[in-house]
């Protein structure tokens, strides 16, 4: 038996306020284009079952364009592939109240052979495939510990679909706002396949458990995914063989190697920026970040911002990060490893307090504590 596992579509995602000639957000169209390519690939595979592991939409209330375009693509898909689809909701589809209902439910009405599980843990039998699918949407994660998550022995194949952060995937811990899924709670070895959603990178967790990753770069920090392939998983349940299908349509993201501007003049920095941009073949089709560190504050004021604005106008997105000289500090991370980080507001406060002289009789420790409390209160 062959299944396709896809997740984190984030249809309706928008960014950068770049519009096409019809007034549609270019990044929203990018994601829809990736979805179309994914559906075409699935139709070629023609699996016995399709599982979608959450975050189908980027928002609980997507735009009319997103809803309409999604339905049209699925209707088109149904003309070439009739495989049943089981989808669960992720954290991005979570609604504030049960009365609001989930937008995903519309697919059960307008697309044939679609089953949606929104808020609670639910078992979906697919009798003609001798398969049981246990669905754990994001809203059901809170009840995992009080639910028996065991395969149904009455069926030949048992599949779990779940949306959240798996504790045995260090890269995913702390990623987004997904609840932590403990290994002991899901009896991982007993399942024929576990389809995870939420983490946007393809990741093997076990021979029978995978994150499929997203179909486009839609996280708040797309730079960490700049070189990652996006796509979907084809899995053979009988032979336990996984095949990742990468998509060609995701937008090019370029994170240019950092430039060290120590001792460089503003004119030299301008030249460096121009040289790096000239290396990009399709500037008008790319999302770009250029970070320049150790920049003298005087040089920052003298940069060629007219030219920089031209780059921003041409590119889908051009982000220039300027890090001032002496704004990088050396510290230790949670694992005791030495790292460098950019100074934050609390670091600057510490420096000021070290040089500050109090009037005689005042306690410096109490003064520092009070200053930090005031700062924290003002930020909140």
Image: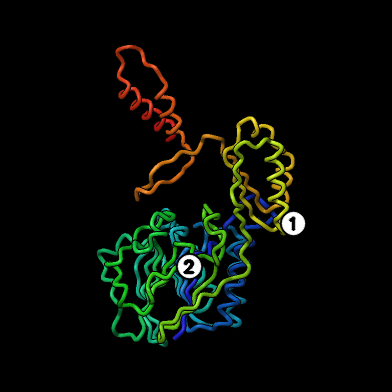
- Earlier residue among tags 2 and 1: 1
- Residue 297 vs residue 213: left or right? right
Q: Left or right of 218: which side holds 283?
A: right
**Up-down relation of residue 93 to residue 338 (above or below):** below
Q: Position of residue 171 (x, y in %)?
A: 42, 59
Per the rendering, the mark at residue 21 is 1
The N terminus is located in which quarter?
bottom left
Residue at 56% in and 72% down = 246
Question: Does residue 59 appear left or right of residue 28 in this picture?
Answer: left
Q: Quadrant of residue 196?
A: bottom left
Identify the element where label 2 is drawn.
Answer: loop
Per the image, the residue denoted by label 2 is 202
> Vertically, is 86 above or below 366?
below
Which residue is situated farthest in the top direction here? 360
Give the percent coordinates (x, y) of residue 224.
52, 56
Q: Is residue 61 left or right of residue 130?
A: right
């Amino acid at each position: 038996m062959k299944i396709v596992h896809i997740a984190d579509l984030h249809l309706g995602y928008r960014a950068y306020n770049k519009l096409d000639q019809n007034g549609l957000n270019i990044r929203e169209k990018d994601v829809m284009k990736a979805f179309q390519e994914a559906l075409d690939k699935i139709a070629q595979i023609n699996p016995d079952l399709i599982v979608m592991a959450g975050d189908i939409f980027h928002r609980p209330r997507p735009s009319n364009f997103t809803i309409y375009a999604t339905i049209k693509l699925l209707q088109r898909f149904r003309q070439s592939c009739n495989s049943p689809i089981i989808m669960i909701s992720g954290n991005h589809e979570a609604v504030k109240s049960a009365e609001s209902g989930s937008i995903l439910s519309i697919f059960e009405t307008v697309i044939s052979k679609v089953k949606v599980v929104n808020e609670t843990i639910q078992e979906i039998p697919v009798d003609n495939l001798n398969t049981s699918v246990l669905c754990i949407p994001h809203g059901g994660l809170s009840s995992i510990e009080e639910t028996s998550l065991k395969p149904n022995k009455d069926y030949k194949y048992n599949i779990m679909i779940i949306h959240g952060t798996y504790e045995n995937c260090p890269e995913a811990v702390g990623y987004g706002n997904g609840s932590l899924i403990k290994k002991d709670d899901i009896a991982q070895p007993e399942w024929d396949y576990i389809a995870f959603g939420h983490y946007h990178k393809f990741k093997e967790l076990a021979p029978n458990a995978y994150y499929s990753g997203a179909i486009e770069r839609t996280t708040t920090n797309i730079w960490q995914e700049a070189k990652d392939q996006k796509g979907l998983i084809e899995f053979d349940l009988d032979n336990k063989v996984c095949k990742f299908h990468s998509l060609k349509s995701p937008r090019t993201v370029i994170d240019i190697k950092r430039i060290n501007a120590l001792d460089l003049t503003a004119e030299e920095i301008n030249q460096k920026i121009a040289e790096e941009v000239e290396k990009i073949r399709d500037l008008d089709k790319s999302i770009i970040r250029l970070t320049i560190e150790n920049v003298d504050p005087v040089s920052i004021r003298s940069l060629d911002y007219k030219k920089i604005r031209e780059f921003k106008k041409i590119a889908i997105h051009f982000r220039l990060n300027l890090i001032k000289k002496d704004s990088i500090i050396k510290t230790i991370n949670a694992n005791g490893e030495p790292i460098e980080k950019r100074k934050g507001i609390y670091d600057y406060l510490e420096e000021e307090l070290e040089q500050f002289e109090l009037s005689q009789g005042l306690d410096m420790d109490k003064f520092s504590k009070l200053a930090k409390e005031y700062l924290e209160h003002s930020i909140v």
